[in-house]
Image (spheres, rainbow, N blue to C red):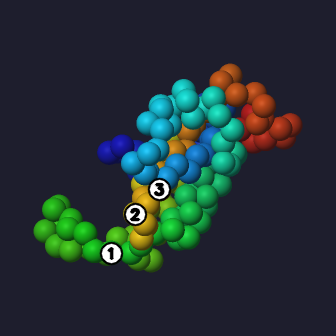
Amino acid sequence: MIGRQTITDEWRSQRVHWHAYVIPRTDSADRRWRLRVVRLDSEPDAVLSSPVAVADWIERLTREHIEPRQTWAAAEQSWVEFGDADDLARSRRLHLVVASHGDSLYVDIPTSSVPLDLFVEAVTHAECDQHNPEGDPAAA
């Protein structure tokens, strides 16, 4: 990821869209959900057609479920706020950058009860042609 801090339109040439999944991390959770092939074989919670849609979806779920707290940042040698407005803005920018390169994102959200894992899988139209409506900019 280092060196790829710029928002691009690389995702368009890769002809990707994203299948998004929300999976609660419980002791009884089926571990097969950790496998991309298993997730892609199931109906996604959302189908996202642009990096902005990816960043919006992750931000919305994060804001709905996160339990803000402090965490130790070894690089800064200080405590930092996790889940505050600055953290959410930094995270949104990072999610936008990663998605703009046509990549998948995996995000965990600490909540007051069960942590949530978000899997946002970059999928080519060769891998999935059912979520590519006419006029989708990713098809251009």
Q: Is residue 74 above or below residue 68?
A: above
- Measuring from the top left, give residue 9's x and y in whole percent: 60, 43
**Residue type, numbered disc 1:** Arg
Label 1: which residue? 69
Tell which of 25 and 63 is nearer to you: 25
Q: Is residue 41 above or below residue 66?
A: above
Instruction: Answer with left or right where residue 69 lies relative to residue 53.
Output: left
Label 2: which residue? 110
**Which badge, 2 or 1, is on the more N-terminal residue?**
1
Identified at 35% across, 71% down, the residue is: 82
**Which badge, 2 or 3, is on the more N-terminal residue?**
2
- Rounded to the nearest angstrom, the CA distance separating label 2 from label 3 is 7 Å
Front of the two marks 1 and 3: 3
Q: Residues within 10 Å of mark 3 (few under 14, many from 20)?
A: many
- Rounded to the nearest angstrom, the CA distance separating label 1 from label 3 is 16 Å
Q: Residue furthest front?
A: 28
**Residue type, numbered disc 3:** Leu
Image quadrant assignment for residue 128: top right
Q: Residue furthest right?
A: 134
Q: Residues within 10 Å of mark 2 (few under 14, many from 20)?
A: some
Instruction: Answer with left or right where residue 129 lies relative to residue 3.
Output: right
Which dot marks residue 116?
3
User: Are the two marked residues, 2 and 1, in contact with CB atoms closer than 8 angstroms?
Assistant: yes
